[in-house]
Image (cartoon, helix red, strand yellow):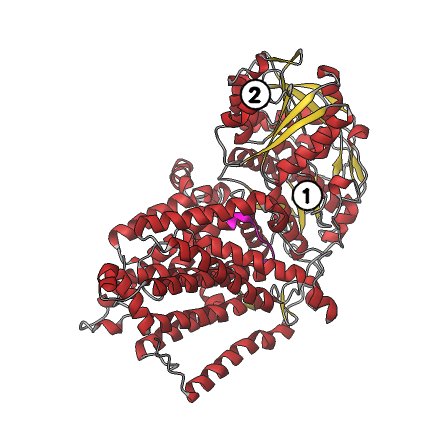
């Protein structure tokens, strides 16, 4: 199907099913139950899952295939975001121009950065990209304040020109990000018994783009071009000695993954019309590296899982506070409940970084192939006879870093 | 190079799938559920949820922790617990200690990380998932502006926490956002007369400014108000926000012929730059036949604590200080102190006030509808919340109240007793026209009830 082999088609269908059914999968607990705290199925988080999924898929095309570890990918995300918000301010609140321009601008910027950075490899390459990203961040935060809004960032305002909207009258949706009149923030609520499910327009727009991005990534992984990139990873020197110039390939991979980042940046703006310079900070670049490694670098679905995992912790665990904790253990005797609260408290709320860090360590130590490897091991338990490599849910042909 | 094989059948299939996907939101859109109450997150049942969005990690985590304490105290008081704190001294008696409009107050918390993205994500989850009717908090102007715009779009009220930049109620003001805290302009206007009295009107000032939005507005405010009293601005230098060692910036100050150094820094920046300046012996220097002086426009107790003995004798401004002796301040310090064992910071004070003001506005309006609340707060005059007579101005949703000019205490008696109030600048001196150049370019817009 669609030029995919059977296992890849199954994987794509799996991803499509998951993204379409996400509102159900992410809201497994009844709204008023104590466990509702762990429901992740609200529009903002679902949007973030797929947007950072796109970001991680793109990063994985560079890191997973060529082994070039870019530490500055957040810069492309940020540049894409700024491009998108300017399109919204100047042209129209329709998300289409914003998204297209964000991809183009991020692509051009990554071409420049990649052209320079790819002259080096290994740690030098990482440091160069990190330097570019930090440079972009500092510029956006202070020197370029007239363009980027500096610390306060940029948002659409009533006073923006929005040329196309004025031309075609209003632009619908009252100055909100929209897709030909469909407000990105509109949601349809469906209540079934105690459960409540949210279907959000913005989420499905982003989800469709993520599926497209995922499909493109499968095609790249399976193409001769992808094979070339894998060759770069396994031994670039030998490749060069055979007379092949590998730089065009790596540069192409770098630009493609920069464009993915730009798409994610544009979508972030489309879903939530605001940009802040922190989006380009080095921790944001580090986060996508974590996503790729946590999920399984070099696998197709790994980065998406990693992105979901990290965003879930950032948004759900960080919101558990002491009083909620006390509520959980209220049934226990006083001393015991205080003890439990004291033990768990450092790991929740502002301690979510700590929890995530510990989980990351566990994954890296025990599942070097990331969450995907975990899935494979579980699948192997239920499988009678060992199958060949194509049976798994990921591209095992590429061992993870 | 690539062998993407697009067969005709495959292409048609793909196009059909994409088309179906694109059509999906269109199919479901007409059925959007309408909220019966006519505004976002109308509280159902016996409780109402407030969202406390404060920095729990990052450079302003101390302020965030203190804000959270004050919020919890406010919720306790609103629900009738504790000694009632400032509810007893508040000029409005609409609050009865039975929650807001008879609904018990509950809250959710989130971590802004002092990043606008994270702050918005956290605020959105409060609105979309937890059903928060009001968002409050924040310890930096970037976050305040970002979250304020979000709340405007989503149709909930935003009660700003610690945000000092002019922009929050200037060019980035929003109808659904309100600020109790003072701003850069007010700092300048309050400080200038005191500086004139102490240091004379013939001074040469040198500014070191944190290189971001708040730094710019503060520099502009201080510069224009000191120039109005006859000072000359020798130079203004931007310092990177991440700078920790300011010695290379301090050295040129001595050669510039300036005799006053203005540090437009906040938090850790200010602690480091002030410490550097004092270590360089600036304060013992004589320039132009006068003692060299240092000024810090925005002071907080937490910063004074960080800078230690270096703050002694240095002037600055603050929104509120726990040593004030009016009834409101005393009641607040007492109930905060009894609960947590130490006096509250100005950040704690402003967020406590904001929570009470919101609750009171809801009581007076008789509804949680954001438009009702906006109407109740606009042009509202109140007293008894520690700052004397205060006005929530309708034109820009900024509170106008007396501003405190403080200086680092020479002989502190405890680790909290670091600042002393030099002068209370009356509200008239710090009031400005809504279209003042430092605040121009904004548009409040219409209140948005969402849904």
Up the image or down, A190 lies above or below A110; here it is: below
Residue B336 point in image, percent of width and height: 60, 28
Q: Give the secondary structure at mark 2.
A: loop
Q: Residue at x 60, y 54 (%)?
A: A274
Query: Which mark is drawn over residue A121?
Result: none
Instruction: State the residue in front, B80 or A351.
Output: A351
Up the image or down, A256 lies above or below B374; here it is: below
The segment highlighted magenta reads A272-279
Q: Is residue B321 magenta?
A: no
- Seen as rendered, the residue at the extreme bottom is B9
Is most of the magenta stretch helix, strand or loop? Answer: loop
Residue A328 point in image, percent of width and height: 45, 47
Query: Between disc 1 and disc 2, whose residue precedes?
Result: 1
Query: Which mark is drawn over residue B416?
Result: 2
Instruction: State the residue in front, A229 or B60.
Output: A229
Instruction: State the residue in front, B2 or A153.
Output: B2
Q: Is residue A199 visible?
A: no
Q: Give the secondary structure at mark 1.
A: helix
Q: Is residue A370 visible?
A: yes
Query: In the rendered structure, the residue with mark 1 lies on which chain?
Result: B
Up the image or down, A233 lies above or below B111; here it is: below
Which of the 4 image quadrants contains residue B97?
top right
Q: Is residue A196 left or right of residue B96?
A: left
Mark 1 or 2: the one toward you: 1
Q: Residue at x 53, y 40 (%)?
A: B55
Residue bearing the label numbered 1 = B168
Q: Residue at x 77, y 24 (%)?
A: B229
Is disc 2 on the same chain as disc 1?
A: yes
């Amino acid at each position: 199907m669609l030029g995919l082999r059977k296992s890849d088609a199954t994987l794509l269908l799996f991803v499509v099913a998951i993204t379409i059914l996400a509102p159900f999968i992410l809201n497994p607990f009844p709204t008023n139950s104590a466990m509702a705290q762990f429901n992740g199925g609200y529009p903002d988080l679902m949007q973030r899952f797929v947007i950072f999924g796109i970001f991680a898929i793109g990063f994985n095309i560079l890191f997973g295939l060529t082994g070039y570890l870019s530490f500055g990918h957040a810069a492309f995300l940020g540049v894409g975001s700024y491009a998108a918000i300017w399109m919204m301010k100047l042209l129209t609140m329709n998300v289409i121009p914003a998204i297209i321009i964000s991809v183009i601008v991020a692509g051009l910027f990554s071409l420049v950065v990649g052209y320079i950075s790819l002259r080096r490899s290994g740690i030098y390459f990482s440091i160069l990209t990190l330097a570019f990203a930090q440079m972009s961040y500092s510029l956006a935060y202070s020197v370029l304040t007239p363009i980027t809004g500096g610390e306060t960032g940029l948002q659409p305002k009533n006073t923006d020109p929005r040329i196309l909207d004025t031309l075609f009258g209003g632009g619908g949706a009252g100055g909100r990000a929209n897709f030909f009149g469909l407000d990105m923030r509109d949601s349809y609520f469906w209540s079934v018994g105690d459960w409540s499910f949210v279907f959000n327009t913005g989420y499905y727009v982003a989800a469709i783009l993520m599926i497209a991005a995922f499909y493109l990534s499968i095609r790249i992984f399976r193409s001769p071009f992808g094979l070339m990139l894998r060759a770069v990873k396994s031994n670039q020197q030998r490749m060069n000695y055979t007379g092949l110039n590998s730089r065009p390939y790596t540069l192409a991979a770098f630009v493609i993954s920069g464009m993915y980042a730009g798409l994610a940046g544009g979508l972030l703006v489309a879903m939530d019309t605001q940009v802040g310079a922190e989006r380009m900070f080095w921790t944001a670049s580090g986060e996508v590296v974590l996503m790729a490694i946590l999920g399984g670098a070099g696998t197709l679905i790994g980065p998406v899982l990693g992105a979901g995992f990290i965003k879930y912790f950032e948004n759900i665990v960080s919101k558990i506070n002491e009083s909620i904790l006390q509520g959980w253990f209220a049934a226990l005797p006083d001393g015991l409940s205080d003890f439990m609260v004291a033990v768990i408290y450092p790991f929740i709320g502002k301690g979510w970084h700590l929890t995530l860090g510990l989980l990351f360590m566990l994954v890296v130590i025990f599942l070097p192939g990331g969450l995907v490897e975990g899935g494979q091991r579980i699948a192997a338990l239920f499988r009678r006879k060992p199958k060949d490599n194509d049976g798994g849910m990921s591209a095992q042909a590429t061992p993870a870093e | 190079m690539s062998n993407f094989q697009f067969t005709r059948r495959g292409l048609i299939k793909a196009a059909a799938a994409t088309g179906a996907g694109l059509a999906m939101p269109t199919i479901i859109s007409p059925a959007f559920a309408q909220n019966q109450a006519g505004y976002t997150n109308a509280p159902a049942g016996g409780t109402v949820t407030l969202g406390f969005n404060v920095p729990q990690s990052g450079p302003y985590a101390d302020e965030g922790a203190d804000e959270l304490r004050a919020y919890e105290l406010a919720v306790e008081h609103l629900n009738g617990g504790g000694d009632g704190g400032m509810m007893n001294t508040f000029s409005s008696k609409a609050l009865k200690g039975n929650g807001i409009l008879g609904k018990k107050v509950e809250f959710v918390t989130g971590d802004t990380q002092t990043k606008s993205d994270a702050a918005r994500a956290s605020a959105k989850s409060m609105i979309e998932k937890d059903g928060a009717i009001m968002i409050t908090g924040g310890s930096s102007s970037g976050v305040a502006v970002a979250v304020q715009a979000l709340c405007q779009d989503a149709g909930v009220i935003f009660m700003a926490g610690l945000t000092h930049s002019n922009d929050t109620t200037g060019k980035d003001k929003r109808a659904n956002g309100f600020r109790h805290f003072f701003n850069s302009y007010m700092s300048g206007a309050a400080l200038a007369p005191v500086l004139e009295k102490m240091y004379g009107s013939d001074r040469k000032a040198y500014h070191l400014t944190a290189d971001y939005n708040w730094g710019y507005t503060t520099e502009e405010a201080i510069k224009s108000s000191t120039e109005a009293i006859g000072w000359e601005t020798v130079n203004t230098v931007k310092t990177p926000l991440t700078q920790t060692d300011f010695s290379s910036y301090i050295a040129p100050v001595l050669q510039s012929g300036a005799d006053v150094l203005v540090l437009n820094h906040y938090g850790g920046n200010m602690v480091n730059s002030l410490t550097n300046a004092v270590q360089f012996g600036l304060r013992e220097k004589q320039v132009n036949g006068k003692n060299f002086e240092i000024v810090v426009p925005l002071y907080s107790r937490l910063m004074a604590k960080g800078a230690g003995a270096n703050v002694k004798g240095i002037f600055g401004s603050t929104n509120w200080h726990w040593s004030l002796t009016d009834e409101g301040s005393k009641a607040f310090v007492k109930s905060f102190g009894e609960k947590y064992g130490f006096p509250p910071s100005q950040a704690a004070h402003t967020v406590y006030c904001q929570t009470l003001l919101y609750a009171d506005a809801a009581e007076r309006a008789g509804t949680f509808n954001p438009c009702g609340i906006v109407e109740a707060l606009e042009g509202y005059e109140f007293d008894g919340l520690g700052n004397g007579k205060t006005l929530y101005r309708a034109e820009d949703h900024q509170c106008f109240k007396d501003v405190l000019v403080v200086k680092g205490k020479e002989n502190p008696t405890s680790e909290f007793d670091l600042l002393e109030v030099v002068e209370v600048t009356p509200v008239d001196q710090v009031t400005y026209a809504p279209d003042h150049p430092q605040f121009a370019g904004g548009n409040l817009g219409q209140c948005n009830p969402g849904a």
